[in-house]
Image (cartoon, grey):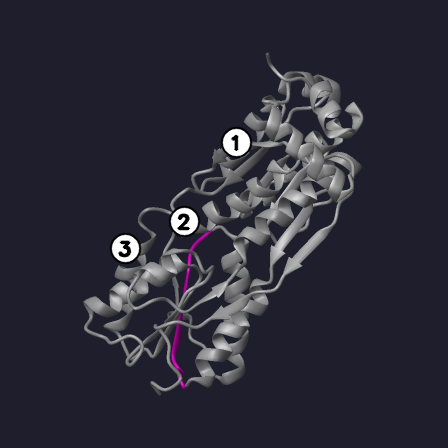
Amino acid sequence: MKATITDVADRAGVSVATVSRVVNGNYPVRRATRARVEAAIAALSYVPNIQARELNMQRSSSIGVVVPGFENMFFAEVLKGIEDRLRQSSYSLLLACAENDSAQEKRCVMDLLARNASGVIVVSPNTETIASDFYADTAGRLPLVFINSYERVPGISYVTSDERGGTRIALEYLLRCGYGHILFVRGEKSDSYRIKEEVYRAIMQERGTFSEADILNIGAGNSLETVDHTMRALMRRMEKGAVTAVFCCNDMMGAGAVNACKRMGRRVPEDIAVVGYDNTSLSRFIEPKLTTIDQRMAELGAAAAQLMLEKINRETTRDILLENRLVERETTSCRAK
């Protein structure tokens, strides 16, 4: 016979309301009490009635998440952080891919709204979508949380990686190691790339070494072609003059930079250093292993999920900023210069 919420309450020695709070995650419960309820749920193989829960709460038990693409491991690791946190509150994910396209991103959000999602988390929202006032209009219709967006829209909560600080850490590290001529590789239509470029320009201009020719925009930064596009763009640039280091706006571009050096017969890091960004699994898989900046992706996701729960349960809006950290591996060496 299928266990009921009353069976769980009796076994745990608590009220039905307490079991409901543990299952729904909408009110605080003492740790010891929560542990007893969770043990009873496991022992009885209790499965909550999702439809009844949604009727009782008058909202869906699903949270929508929109990502620019699936090719970049960054998004998968952020998603894991979101899912791990939401699972604790008995929410599930509805996942949508914007395919690096503003119009598709709008369709994804509207589809999630039509599916009655309780809220939508947008990872690296498209700058064209933000400029169109789409999100300003949508924020009044459902809870929204942005991950890594720098254009503020009223009514939206933000969790942001400190990419300004992380970029400065990476560039100053390369300069300290003696890599003086640093190329900058970015993609298009993302605040993340724009913010990093602003820092790069400022530092190079301070040194009197800035050149527009040292900024390479490879187009779509989160596609299947990102690695190859980066490799080809850098190979063309290397043919035009000496380069000592390459700073890349994500690890996929970093992998492309390492491939370019191999194709051109340049040793990494002895001839050219490469620094990526994100600290995805890819940075540990390539050879030599990629020095990168850690965006703490799982923490980004978990923080976004927490902000979403706050918006749903208490209608509060706030921002979270996470520091970035340098992860030094094999594509840089201060002993090399």
Q: Position of residue 143 (x, y in %)?
A: 69, 35
Closer to us: 211 or 181: 181
Q: Residue furthest top?
A: 1
* SS state under label 1: helix
Q: Circle 2 sits on which residue?
A: 72
Q: Earlier in the sequence, mark 2 or mark 1?
A: 2
Q: Residue 152 location, x and y as percent?
A: 68, 50
Residue 108 is tagged as: 1
Residue 68's place in the image compared with 268, above or below, is above
In the rendered image, residue 243, in percent from the top left (x then y), is placed at 32, 77
Q: Looking at this view, is 304 or 26 the one in front?
A: 26
Residue 184 appears in which quarter of the rendering? bottom left
Image quarter hosting the N terminus: top right
Tell me which residue sits at (42%, 84%) in the image: 177
Query: Horizontal placement of 123 versus 328: left or right?
Result: right
Comparing marks 2 and 1, which lies closer to the viewer?
A: 2
| Percent x, y of residue 64 | 58, 33
Q: CA distance from mark 2 to mark 3?
A: 14 Å
The reply to whether residue 46 is in sight is yes
Q: Is residue 182 magenta?
A: yes
Circle 3 is placed at which residue position?
228
- Disc 2 marks a residue whose amino acid type is Asn
Q: What amino acid does circle 1 point to?
A: Cys
Within 10 Å of disc 1 (Cα), the crowding (few <14, some 14-19, many 20+) is: many
Q: Amino acid at mark 3?
A: Asp
The structure residue drawn at horizontal position 34% and vertical position 52%, both measured from the top left corner, is 226
Crowding at mark 2 (Cα within 10 Å: few <14, some 14-19, many 20+): some
In the foreground, 209 or 261? 261
Left or right placement of residue 60 versus residue 128 in this view: right
Q: Which residues are magenta?
A: 178-188
